[in-house]
Amino acid sequence: MASSMKNLQLIILALLIYSFSSNHYVIITTIFAYVPKENIALDCGSPDDQTTEDGRIWIRDHDKDSRYSLIEVEGQSKSNIFIASSQYDSVDRVPYMTARVSRFQFTYSFRVTPGPKFIRLHFYSTRYHDQDDFDPSKAFFTVKAGPFTLLSNFSAFLTAEFLDQRAFMREFCLNVEENIEKLDIVFLPSSSPLSENHVNSSYVFVNGIEIVSMPTTLYYTPPTGKLTPPLLGNLGRSFGDYSNRALQMVHRLNVGGSGISPMNDTGMYRQWTSDFKYFISEGFVSCNTSRKPKYSTIPNYTAPDDVYRTAITMGNNATKNTLRNVTWRLPVDSRFFYLVRLHFCEFDESLTKAGDRIFRIYIDNYTADNAFSVMDWSGGNMIPVYRDFVVSIVDEPYLFVDLHTREMDSTYADAILNGLEVFKISNYDRNLAGPNPSLLASPGSDQTLNPTTNKSKSNKTLPAIALGSGVAGFLVLLSMVCCVVLLRLRKTKRRPSSYKRKSSKSTRGSSRRLPEQLCQRFSFSEIKSATNNFEQALEIGRGGFGNVYRGHIDDEFPEVAIKRLSKGSSRQGEREFEAEIKMLSQLRHVHLVSLIGYCDEGSEMILVYDYMANGTLRDHLYGTNNDPLSWKQRLEICVGAARGLHYLHSEVKDTIIHRDVKTTNILLDDKWVAKVADFGLSREGRGDSGAVSTVVRGTFGYLDPEYAQSRQLTDKSDVYSFGVVLFEVLCARKPVDVKLEEEQRNLAQWARRCVREGKIQDIIDPFLMGKISPECFKNFVQVAEKCVRDHRNRRPTMRDVAEKLEFALELQEKADAAKQAISPDGVYVYPDLSFHLVDDHHDHGHGYDVLGLHGGTYFSTTVGSDSVESSLRSVDTESGKIRDVFSDASNSKSRV
Ligand SMILES: *[C@@H]1O[C@H](CO)[C@@H](O)[C@H](O)[C@H]1NC(C)=O
């Protein structure tokens, strides 16, 4: 079997790697903890075997194969093999590029051994034929596996729309009985009114099918001596044996962490996703550890180590914790029983006995456990364990999981959860199918910008580019300004000293108040050794109020960026330090930087972030040896950054205005995902009216002229700065370049003028010539132009910007797909660009003599609520930073 050969190779490779790194040998047994007896991945419609980027082999769809056979009903038209008419980067080529499509029933019959199996069905709702006769919205069908109905009158089109994902997978589990030795999967189109030429307008299609065996005790039969799960609300009675039922995986979440791809599962190719979308509580702590889970109570294939290495806990404010629940809200179909599996691993080393963290678990308002202690069940620190429950969902379309503290007997008022799986259980009539999602009820607005949807993961092909520019990448590492990582805050090595024991008073004497929910607090000596006592060679940037160093803290944090506030920073700096910690520790978004920890010993104020492999966006635009970014990469980065800013503006409780949006504050991780960084200048906004501030802050060239003049800060100031970023990305030049003719120095003003005069196409990055589709260009320029309008009321919101950019990206993808179809060698050129402003407004940029058009120095008046002062400031035209930004004004009492 080719695929198990592949596994073997990987194991050997892993052995080789790990034998070099001392005693980490055990990890291998985790990665490949289980080798499935059957491991079939069928690429429906594909004439040849295909290997995915991550190395999995998908077998061809062929009449003659020993592992399965295709059965079609005699006397009917045969099914078709089609290639998808459009492919997107967000959609994996394998298995989604090809499909088996039919207006009649067909069956794949797999030869399998008895026992429990995963069945995964992959669908990509798109056009599969040039003619209109296979309209994706008309495909309604039923899928049966053995005696079970998995899907009924199912529309992949509606589901894809609802999920906001072009392609998706549905996973089921069932037990193949003894002596049957085959598993028939039947695809059956729903009947619908016949079309004009008397054919069923409905049809069925499938892109990929996986059949993978699983250990018998994983989801079905409890390990010997264990009981079947309790049915909640039924006086503690068990749900009984359900091994003769089928399951549908509805949610499989790595709580507090990021997604885990099928290749990083324990051998069963399960997909784990972040719980981010479903976590609805505010004020939480997401933690992680690098320690290795020790499997003794459950088998090591139960979940990948990473599931047990990340968690959500409640934080260290006992009083607050007792007043709230940590809650996940999971969409489900009503009228089914659900199997809910909660994964736990107590990885806080400071907790040593079962009574340290006892908490309550509620599932859908039922008490699942009134006094649960992870260590009581697992037997110790770092030992994973799980609990199963069954609950019936009658009419609510959600399943809630709530954790609540237990004050009376727990040392700490806290709770923890590491992973969560939810399975729908088939009904007595062996049905698992629910209704199609109604698009009216679609999450719509709050999904369009959701970071976990497929569109945002559209950088699949980018790592290859990253590899290609390895040397350049190294230079980037050296030149990056800031830091960061994906969605996780790091694990508490030990509790911050402000961690409260239940009922004991805070022992911290410091006057500086820090937020209660921090994950990690480092000592100054740790930071010193991490940076070789702030060695100059490790300096990677100079930020707004201090230097940034690269370093590593133990094995736990091999690469971090450490931002140290300059000594003797003004009080304002301290306040910003607090603001940044407070904000970062509460924000969690795939397009925002996250904080690992901080150090506030003595006069030191230090922030620790994860290291961002690809540096800043600017490093890839101009003045660099890096390869230029493709237009699509640029669009994807802009979409990501726009989503991050939109999240700051509207998806968090208090609007947060970034105040320093620029290309050096948009960082790129190793997968080229954009992350908005540096909230040092952020502060909470006050809605539309805007706060009047004494201090204008921001960076020269990006500064909103209306804000600079009125001192009224609104989220539209960020929109302006972002507009400058968009032009910077399009034109690959500095926002302020004093070497240019005066009229061209300020990019925003110059670009607007070019737009007005219909010659914006003349100033774009020469590298992009012929690579931008005219439609995409029009939309991009339109939104960029709107962002940099003088009057904030004429600028779009960040949400609009994100949506328009997504649309522009889509237009480019469509145009590329169309071009590729005509020129398969991939060489094609777009016609010359042009853009004409069709606009009725009169906001033509003459309103203000924008700061810095003349470089050098400028004069400005600061108006505060209780101070009026004039100041002459020097402008560093090279770095584009306004020096000494009204530092005196920071003493003003009115500073919020
Ligand atoms: C926590 O959730 C449970 C179950 O949903 C509910 O009964 C309880 O009132 C909640 N407690 C708080 C403090 O919100």
Image (spheres, helix red, strand yellow):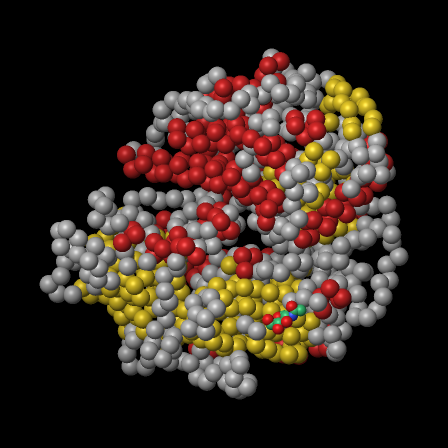
The one of 121 and 790 positioned closer to us in this rendering:
790
Residue 61 placement (x, y as % from top left): 26, 57
| Relative horizontal placement of residue 450, taking residue 193 as reference (left or right) | right
Measured along the vertical axis of the image, is residue 399 above or below residue 127? Answer: below
Q: Which residue is painted at 69% across and 52% down in the image?
A: 585
Q: Nearer the viewer, residue 577 or 110?
A: 577
The quadrant of the image that shows the C terminus is top right
Residue 66 in sight from this viewpoint: no
Q: Residue at x 34, y 31 (%)?
A: 827
Which image quarter: residue 343? bottom right
Image x and y of residue 655, in percent: 65, 45
Q: In which quarter of the image is ligand 1?
A: bottom right
Kindly identify the residue that appears in the image at 63 percent across and 22 percent down: 736
Q: Residue at x 73, y 23 (%)?
A: 876
Viewer-proximal residue among 574 and 179:
574
Residue 479 rendering spot, x and y as whole percentages: 65, 35
Does residue 390 appear in the picture of this structure?
yes
